[in-house]
Image (tube, rainbow, N blue to C red):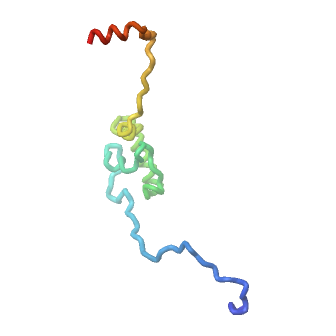
Amino acid sequence: MNKSKRPFLKPKERPFLKSKQSFRRRLPLIRPGDRIDYQNTSLISRCISENGKILSRRVNKSTLKQQRLITSAIKQARILSSLPFKNNDLFEINKPIKKNKPTAKARKKDRPGRKKARQKER
């Protein structure tokens, strides 16, 4: 069927077309010569999120075997306290506001005559 014989059908417009630009693929974090070990904290720390969680395989761009070695190395490093279990750097930047807790002692209310006495002392 020719397009000229279909006057009731309009050609579809595609507003969100992908660009034809080529993109550069990022290199994986772990290269073939890297040693995945609990002592290699520079490599392990790249596989941990800002909160201290282990990043997924898809984010790390690692194989299944590499990911297993990474997770075991991170867990060993945490136990040996070379890596923190949680990263509290976010809390240091934005410290929570501390509320003043009421004390156990009841506060004495100012009596009307006391204000005048205080002003005379100054």
The tally of labels here is 0
Task: Using the image as rendered, state which of residue 88 and residue 93 is in the foreground.
Answer: 93
Q: Position of residue 10 (x, y in %)?
A: 67, 83
Q: Is residue 27 visible?
A: yes
The residue lying at 40 percent from left, 46 percent from top is 50
Q: Position of residue 101 (x, y in %)?
A: 44, 20
Report the quarter where the C terminus lies.
top left
The residue lying at 31 percent from left, 48 percent from top is 42
Task: Using the image as rendered, state which of residue 56 and residue 51 is in the foreground.
Answer: 51
Task: Using the image as rendered, state which of residue 20 and residue 103 is in the foreground.
Answer: 103
Q: Position of residue 99 (x, y in %)?
A: 43, 26
Position of 111 relative to 49 (above/below)? above
Location of residue 93 by image quarter = top left
Q: Position of residue 37 (x, y in %)?
A: 35, 46
Report the quarter where the N terminus lies.
bottom right
Position of 92 relative to 65 (above/below)? above
Q: Is residue 77 visible?
A: no
The residue lying at 47 percent from left, 54 percent from top is 57
Task: Kindly give the residue lying farthest to the left in the view shown.
Answer: 122
Position of 15 relative to 104 (above/below)? below
